[in-house]
Amino acid sequence: MKKYILALDQGTTSSRCIVYDKLGNKIGEAQRELPQIYPLSGWVEHDPEAIWSTQLYAIETAVKRAGIDPSEIAAIGITNQRETTVVWDKRTGKAICNAIVWQCRRTADYCEEIKKSGYEPVLKEKTGLIADPYFSLTKVRYILDNVDGARDLCEEGNLAFGTVDSWLIHKLTNGKCHATDASNASRTMMYNIHEGKWDEDILKHFSIPESMLPKVVPSSGYIADAEILGTQIPICGVAGDQQASLFGQCCFNSGDAKNTYGTGCFLLMNTGMDAVRSKNGLLTTVAWQIGNELTYALEGSVFIAGAAIQWLRDGLGILASSSDSEKMALDIPNTDGVYFVPAFTGLGAPHWDPDCRGLICGLSRGTDRRHIVRAALESMAYQTLDVLTLMERESKTEIPALRVDGGASANGFLCSFQADISGKAVIRPSNTETTSLGAACLAGLGCGLYDSVEEISSLSNSSTVFEPKMDASVRDEYISGWKNAVKKTGLR
Ligand code: ADP
């Protein structure tokens, strides 16, 4: 009986594999760190062979630990760090240089040139993205312009580009399949999210031949057979990490939203078949494609969330561990007017000011480290609220409840405060590894293990619900204090 699903979760710092059964229970898992390469300040690379070898190790180890036979695996689902760019020679199957990681800022000047040239509004309209080095387009251009022989190989039709999902599919199929799914394609800044295809004008404008691009396939459905573990296993689900987590959180309806509290926060809201255009710096992206139907999402991010807690621990040394923050915060009734705006690298949506900087304000003689720790946790909730409010305004849709995951969602104080300050229920599933679960569900749906998304919704990922309890007047006072603090960062 083919009853298990292999979820491959290729992240920025590690490659993981989780074996799920049909009910969404974890049967086995394994993980291996991925070495980071920093050739220059602000540059980040990965060795594509290391991406593959760590992923393969995780697959083999997870299956062994699960104690199952590879013949019992119904399908593979892939989720991955997004935007990271790999370029390989189609003849040898080998990458021609290191992968340029999403975090890498080497194309910042080039993005400035794009903005000055007046082409950014065209990119934004077609792709839903802003001209930023994160996205794959300028990374591909960098490789074509700077790697010896790349342009020639490309003109001969011998180069292939792919995000990490494509690279894994290439490796899993021994070079037989060059494909990506629509959610990953929508992060390349070359994909027209409204028409659902690579955009000819953009490709022409940046001299990128379509011959190097992968075929775009639905996020759920048969893609190709992986030749691993001495057998053939169909790959039936693919999505970028944030989109996979939206799916794993069962955010299937328009207005459903999830927030991932990690180093930063990623807030995504399902907007259904409507690709909502943002005027205030949210991104419009493909959530997933099932059959011919594209589902869209609005995406907003907070740059510094859990990282503020890390800074209190490692920079100030006032916390022994991240998880201690909960007990300290609960030891006092409130911050006594202390606010912490962790604008270490400026502020993102809805402010978009890269130059303002962080602050802690409202200090009095009675302030101690508990107030500062609590203010740091509260800042995650306030920043999330700012993005959430903007999303509701721009989509003209009310978000009924917020589903949460990510490392810092383990903090119960944070979840309750988020519910209080946003006046919405906060739902935390017991399996907060929603990214791999989402990939598994896409694959399960794609291979027929599940008949519908309704069946996936009924899987028992039990959850804790945090209901809002704060008085509206107290909430308004807190929020206005936060807004005042944000103004003091030197915001333009
Ligand atoms: P990422 O995937 O971005 O590396 P994770 O989802 O693993 O991040 O979350 C790690 C972040 O969450 C760290 O910044 C850490 O400080 C923070 N964190 C982890 N546990 C807690 C906790 N119990 N309370 C508050 N913050 C936490």
Image (cartoon, rainbow, N blue to C red):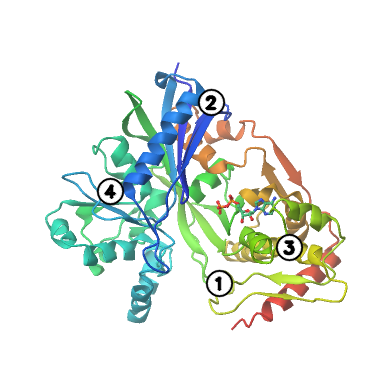
Callout 4: helix, strand or loop?
loop
Residue 71 in the image: x percent, y percent?
A: 39, 19
Amino acid type at circle 4 is Pro
Residues under numbered marks 4 and 1 in contact, where contact means CB atoms less than 8 Å apart = no
Residue position marked by numbered label 2 in the rendering: 21
Residue position marked by numbered label 4 in the rendering: 214
Residue position marked by numbered label 3 in the rendering: 318
Amino acid type at circle 3 is Ile
Residue 261 in the image: x percent, y percent?
A: 62, 54
Of the numbered discs 4 and 3, the one sitting upstream in the chain is 4
Residue at 32%, 23% in the rendered image: 230
Q: Is 114 placed above or below 221 here? A: below
Badge 1 residue CB within 8 Å of ligand 1: no
Residue 345 shows which numbered tag? 1
How far apart in space, not on screen, are marks 1 and 2 (Cα)?
A: 42 Å
Q: Quadrant of residue 318?
A: bottom right
